[in-house]
Amino acid sequence: MVTPDRRTASVLLTILLFALVLGILYIARAVVVIFAFSILFAYLIDPIVRFLQRHSLLFKNLRGPHILEAYLALIVVSLVLAHGLFPNFRKDAGRALSTIPAISNKVSSGEIANNLGSNLGWADERAAQIRTFLERHRSNIDHAVEETERAAPVVFGAILVIPILAIFFLADGEALVNQIIHLVATKENHGVWESLAGELHVAFQHYIRAKVILGGLSLLYCSTAMLILRFPNAILLGILAGILEFIPVAGWMIALATIVTAGLLTHSHWIWMLALLGLWRILMDYAIAPRVMGRELEIHPLLAIFTIMVGGAVGGIVGIYLSVPTVAALRVIYRRFARPPMELPVPGSFIQTPDPKTGNSVVA
């Protein structure tokens, strides 16, 4: 019987171990996604925590109190925004939830077309066309409603869990990274792993900065357009659009529906606003976002578009959001381990190199 030599056995064992890890990650992909979003949320909150810690008179050496302050500030801002947009939310929430089944039945049956036609003054022919369209796609609408009802508890649970997990990353993220490095690194390559961790940290910071820039641009554009068109609560709706920019696909859809509905109910120029939002979406997806992501993460804008499209095809909304930081992380890992040996730092040494975006020194 021929037995493989030690090198062949080592290669086979590595392949089996790699396949086992991939299998575990696939089975636990929901948990992995939640942890990934928790890490990105921690990166989003971290500048606020650092600002509070830097300008605090007390507890400058402790992060815990300032993490609590940052969360309280976010809660207050969210409550003020919600109250400004939906002042009667507490009274109307229960009634709105109880009417959801009836509304979905009206949509799938096409009855809602008659109600909207009578309220908005549509012609009978137009209302009949919409009703026929809804009746023809009734099975698709019912399937979408069932999928939404099935996914709603999972999404709601994830929304609650992600900020809680982010607290642990904010408080002990550095210690956790050091433990992982200590676990996987040897004495000879310890400096290489620390350098890799520093470069990944900078890459994720740039990704979050790009998302903040895109959210700010959406806030400015939507607020300006609604002020010109004399929409009510233009600033609050603009802030909502900027915040929802962090959520791919679903975020801008929710913002568009909210803004157009507000204009429709207040008899504002909602058709013009709808056209402006459509133009902004095209500019954002195919011009602004790829360039901002490319500049912050040092990838070509066309590669950014390709990455987002592939991520959406593979993982849907989650894939769209995580595709760019994943490619950025893979790029950092490839550059680190593909360098010639002479470019690698001496084991155990630390070289401070300036970050090209911020000018701050990072471990390399």
Image: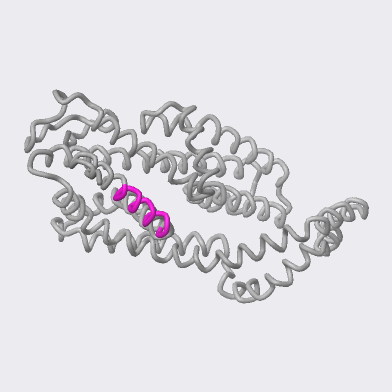
| 164 vs 284: above or below | below
Query: Would residue 280 be found to the left or right of residue 137 on screen?
Result: left
- Name the residue at 13% across, 56% down: 61
- The image position of residue 279, as x and y in percent, is 63, 35
**Res. 359 image quadrant:** top left
Query: Would residue 327 be found to the left or right of residue 234 on screen?
Result: left
| 97 vs 137: above or below | below
- The image position of residue 187, as x and y in percent, is 7, 43
- The image position of residue 102, as x and y in percent, is 73, 72
| 6 vs 84: above or below | above
Which of 234/54 is in front?
A: 54
Which of 307/183 is in front?
A: 183
Tell me which colouring the rendered structure shows: one colour
- The image position of residue 133, as x and y in percent, is 83, 53
- Name the residue at 26% across, 47% down: 13
Figure quadrant of the C terminus:
top left
Q: Is residue 19 magenta?
A: yes
Residues in magenta, as a range: 16-28
- Name the residue at 29% across, 48% down: 47
Counting labels gives: 0
Q: Of helix, strand and loop, which mostly describes the magenta segment?
A: helix
| 119 vs 306: above or below | below
Which of 265/314 is in front?
A: 314
- Name the residue at 16% across, 51% down: 178
